[in-house]
Image (tube, grey):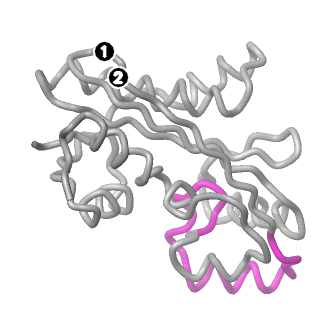
Amino acid sequence: MSIILASASYIRATLLRNAGLNIKSHPASIDEEAIAHERKKMGTPPEEIALWLARAKAEKVSRLFKNQHVIGVDQVLVQGKEFLEKPKNHAEALIQLGKLSAKQHTLFTSAVIFKDGNELWSVTTTAMMSMHELQQEEIVEYLKRNPTVIHNLGSYNFEGEGIRLFKKVVGDYFSILGIPVLEIINFFRREGQLFI
């Protein structure tokens, strides 16, 4: 059984492959910013925005692959009442990490599974992420050593050196990395599609 991941994320695909799933990646081309912006204007809670985005990706890709399970995933990060998006450049990453320093933020991760254009299952997980207080020079040095984090939500890579930025985390490790692997595996086991 092959499963389509509606994402270009290397880490998400790797985590699923490491769990023994036969994954093929097919990124969904949706306007995530427009969907999120519209939902925010409507007052949609952040966890539901994550679900909307994951659903839009899975549904779109599902229509391209008949009789295939398609996984859509997305994350929303909220610090206080502010939604933080992926930084567009190094300067934005610097500002973003400054905002997260010494504070707690919430990371919502949603996953949806579609087949033939129909939603079969969904889940949203929540992680509470508390950062150390970071001096400006620490942030500058972190970004120098880890320039690719400007492509990441929150401007950190939790699976790498970014874990050193945190003093406390409450939540599922895989979900923090971008995909709730355990819940997805449990879905396929219940469906009789995955065996030990």
**Front residue of this view, candidates 97 and 160:** 160
Query: Residue 33 placed where, x, y %?
Result: 57, 31
Q: Residue placed at 72% from the left, 80% from the top? A: 140
139 in the magenta segment = yes
How crowded pointer 2 is (Cα within 10 Å; few <14, some 14-19, many 20+) is rated as few
Residue carrying label 2 = 120
**Magenta portion: prevailing SS class:** helix
Q: Residue placed at 53% from the left, 24% from the top? A: 52
Whether residue 47 is situated above or below residue 55 in the rendered picture: below
User: In the image, which residues are magenta?
Assistant: 131-156
**Front residue of this view, candidates 150 and 8:** 8
How crowded pointer 1 is (Cα within 10 Å; few <14, some 14-19, many 20+) is rated as some
- Which image quarter: residue 1? top left
Q: Is residue 156 left or right of residue 106?
A: left
- The residue type indicated by label 2 comes to Leu
Q: Do the residues labelled 1 and 2 touch (CB within 8 Å)?
A: yes
Query: Residue 131 placed where, x, y %?
Result: 80, 70
Whether residue 147 is situated above or below residue 74 in the rendered picture: below
- The tag on residue 118 is 1
Whether residue 97 is situated above or below residue 49 in the rendered picture: below
Task: Name the element at disc 1.
Answer: strand
**Front residue of this view, candidates 151 and 17:** 17
Q: Residue placed at 80% from the left, 66% from the top? A: 130
Whether residue 86 is situated above or below residue 144 in the rendered picture: above
Instruction: Estimate the spatial distance between the alpha carbons at disc 1 and disc 2, rounded to whole Å.
Output: 6 Å
- Which image quarter: residue 196? bottom left
Query: Residue 182 placed where, x, y %?
Result: 43, 53
